Image: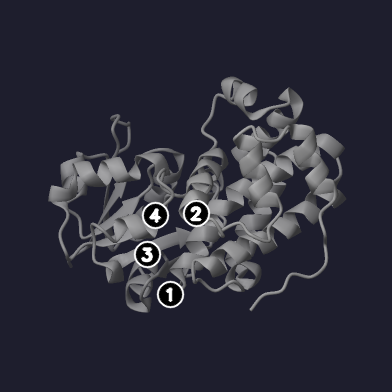
Amino acid sequence: MNKNKIGIIGAGAYGVALNKLFCLNNKNEVLISDVVTKDISNFSTIEKVLDCEYLVFAIPSKFVKEFLDKYVCFFNERQKVLIGTKGFCENGELLSSVFSNYFDQSNICYLAGPGFASEIELHPNITRLNVSGFGINCSEEFSNLFCENICSFSSDILSFEITSALKNVAAFVCGISYEKFKSLNFKYSVASKIYCEISSIVEKFEGNPNTCLTNPLLQADLYMTTSQNESRNFKFGELVCSVGNVKGSLEKANYTVEGLNTINSLIKMKKLNSKLLDDLFILPAVCDLVENKIKLNEFINILENLDFNCCNLK
């Protein structure tokens, strides 16, 4: 029996967790690679990994464009791509848009859902994720590479990709909120408001604004990321509140802050589309905080004075 040949690019915590998930299915032959050799039984060279029919990307968003440019000669039109990377590209583009320059768009999918790497390692069989693509066929094909019940599928890639990127920004904001007031009431009030702002961004990219507010797995991912103190983005928000500014906090942090990278990309997106953050409050304010255009106390004041009337969605 011919096995499904899956190549995972990136052997960090999330890449290793995905490796475990795909290896659960004995119909798969899985290889994994990274820039640094890792002690993993199926670790292989990047050339062999890129020869697989299914490619799964689990590298930081800021390195995606560089990687694709470097290895473009290894890609072919039959390959199918699953983006496990969270965030936006450094130049402000959506990851799915960047991958579309190198692969057939109908073969590109995005992986989303509550997926802390440590949890996947402990409980792989009860992990629940979603694959969303530009077309339903490729999404269903990727979902079938997982064991039964692990992965659902859809064709709403933009909604899943944007929500999954901005959830880390939400966690950062919630970290600041909780460290300042030690109030769960206030933290979740702020979280609910930023969820609505995320839906507005989804709509401006012509995704379905209701998806991030109604899809169970996106709701679980948003809730988990903003509620767990072990979230790196949440911890960084707490650190910023303690230190008083972003720059000083970044010097103290000894971990990658995906949410901060996403905010920097959001700043570039705003320059490309001046109306992107119109009618929003938290997202433009957090961009100003990172750019040092406003002080921390001003940002907190904005959070304290948020309007919690219902959001209008089309």
User: Which badge, 4 or 2, comes first in the chain's sequence?
Assistant: 4
- Residue kind at label 3, given as amino acid type: Cys
> Which residue is at the far left?
73
Q: Secondary structure at mark 2?
A: helix
Q: Quadrant of the C terminus?
A: bottom right
Left or right of residue 235, residue 70 in this image: left
Task: Kindly indicate the quadrant of the structure image that contains residue 173.
Answer: top right
10 Å crowding of disc 3: few (<14), some (14-19), many (20+): many
Percent x, y for residue 259?
Answer: 56, 42
**Can you identify the residue that label 1 sits on?**
155
Q: CA distance from mark 1 to mark 4?
A: 16 Å
Q: Nearer the viewer, residue 151 or 205?
A: 205
Whether residue 127 is visible, yes or no, is no
Spatial separation of the CA atoms under disc 4 and disc 2? 26 Å
- What amino acid type should be assigned to the residue bearing mark 1? Ser
Q: Is residue 132 above or below residue 291?
A: below
Badge 2 vs badge 1, beta-carbon distance below 8 Å: no
Percent of width and height locating residue 251: 58, 20
Residue sitting at x 15%, y 59%:
76
Q: Which residue is mark 2?
A: 124
Q: Which label lies toward us, 4 or 2? A: 4
Q: CA distance from mark 4 to mark 3?
A: 10 Å
Q: Residues within 10 Å of mark 2 (few under 14, many from 20)?
A: some
Q: Nearer the viewer, residue 249 or 85?
A: 249
Question: In this figure, which colouring scheme has been used for the structure?
Answer: one colour
